[in-house]
């Protein structure tokens, strides 16, 4: 960053730090104590879809790597596309296997990054829910790849409404565990993201 950048108020973008994902298990303990949310075992990585043989090969390798895990419970890794044309690679684990889920998310991000597809990575998320059957809210801790930060996202399945007050409460509670995105305009709603639909 040069003198002109400083004078014009430009800042150097934060480099992605995938190791930040490994802070999720400890943040989950804080989240449960502060707001009563526990892991669902669902997580996903979102990326811009790319055409071409190299990307298809990388995608197949990532799926094979994750599907080869003998300890995996539940459905295999799934690839879906949302209404906006972005691809989601979803992993499902049992709720107590959050560290393994984080390893899955890290492996997907690392593989895409190592094969030159880092610019296509958008975000990763781990989903949480409350044990209360009357509370249908879902919470995700979303990692923004290009910012190297997290933000909480709280939605109700089937409704395009957010609980902003709860998001701010969770962000405040997790500041000691995660690098929280300070610019709330970057707390994008991920309607119907895998793991958030119930």
Image: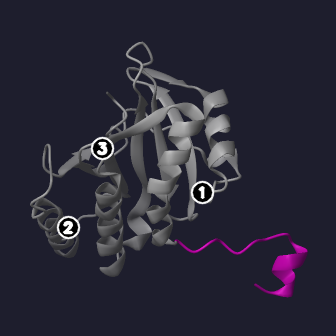
Q: Residue furthest bottom?
A: 2
Residue pictured at 67% horizontal, 28% vertical:
165
- Magenta residues? 1-16
Picture disc at residue 128: none
Picture disc at residue 41: 3
Q: Is residue 176 above or below residue 167?
A: below
Percent of width and height locating residue 4: 85, 82
Q: Is residue 111 left or right of residue 37?
A: left
Percent of width and height locating residue 191: 43, 33
Question: Quarter of the image containing the N terminus?
Answer: bottom right
Q: Earlier in the sequence, mark 2 or mark 3?
A: 3
CA–CA distance in space, label 1 to label 2? 28 Å
Q: Is residue 41 above or below residue 69?
A: above
Q: Earlier in the sequence, mark 1 or mark 2?
A: 2
Percent of width and height locating residue 111: 29, 74
Quick one: 27 or 109, which is closer to the camera? 27
Q: Are marks 1 and 2 in contact (CB under 8 Å)?
A: no
Q: Residue furthest right?
A: 7
| 145 in the magenta segment | no
- Predominant SS along the magenta part: loop
Residue with the mark numbered 2: 62
Quick one: 107 or 30, which is closer to the camera? 30
CA–CA distance in space, label 1 to label 3? 20 Å
Quick one: 2 or 70, which is closer to the camera? 70
**Neighbour tally class for label 3: few under 14, some 14-19, many 20 plus, Cα within 10 Å:** many
Q: SS class of the residue under badge 1?
A: loop
User: What color scheme is it?
Assistant: one colour
Q: How many marks?
A: 3
Residue with the mark numbered 1: 177
Quick one: 22 or 153, which is closer to the camera? 22
| 2 in the magenta segment | yes
Q: Earlier in the sequence, mark 1 or mark 3?
A: 3
């Amino acid at each position: 960053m040069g003198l002109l950048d400083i004078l014009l108020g430009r800042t150097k973008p934060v480099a992605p730090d995938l190791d930040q994902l490994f802070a999720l298990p400890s943040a989950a303990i804080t989240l449960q104590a502060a707001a009563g949310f526990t892991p669902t075992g669902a997580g996903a990585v979102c990326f811009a879809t790319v055409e071409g043989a190299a990307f298809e090969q990388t995608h197949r390798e990532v799926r094979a790597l994750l599907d080869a895990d003998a300890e995996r419970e539940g459905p295999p890794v799934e690839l879906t596309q949302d209404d906006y044309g972005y691809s989601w690679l979803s992993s499902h684990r049992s709720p107590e296997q959050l560290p393994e889920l984080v390893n899955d998310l890290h492996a997907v991000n690392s593989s895409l990054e190592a094969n030159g597809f880092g610019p296509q990575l958008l975000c990763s998320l781990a989903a949480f829910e409350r044990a209360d059957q009357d509370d249908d809210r879902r919470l995700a801790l979303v990692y923004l790849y290009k910012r190297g930060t997290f933000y909480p996202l709280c939605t109700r399945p089937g409704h395009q409404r957010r609980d902003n007050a709860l998001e701010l409460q969770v962000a405040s509670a997790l500041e000691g565990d995660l690098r929280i995105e300070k610019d709330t305009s970057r707390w994008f709603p991920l309607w119907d993201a895998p793991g958030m639909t119930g």
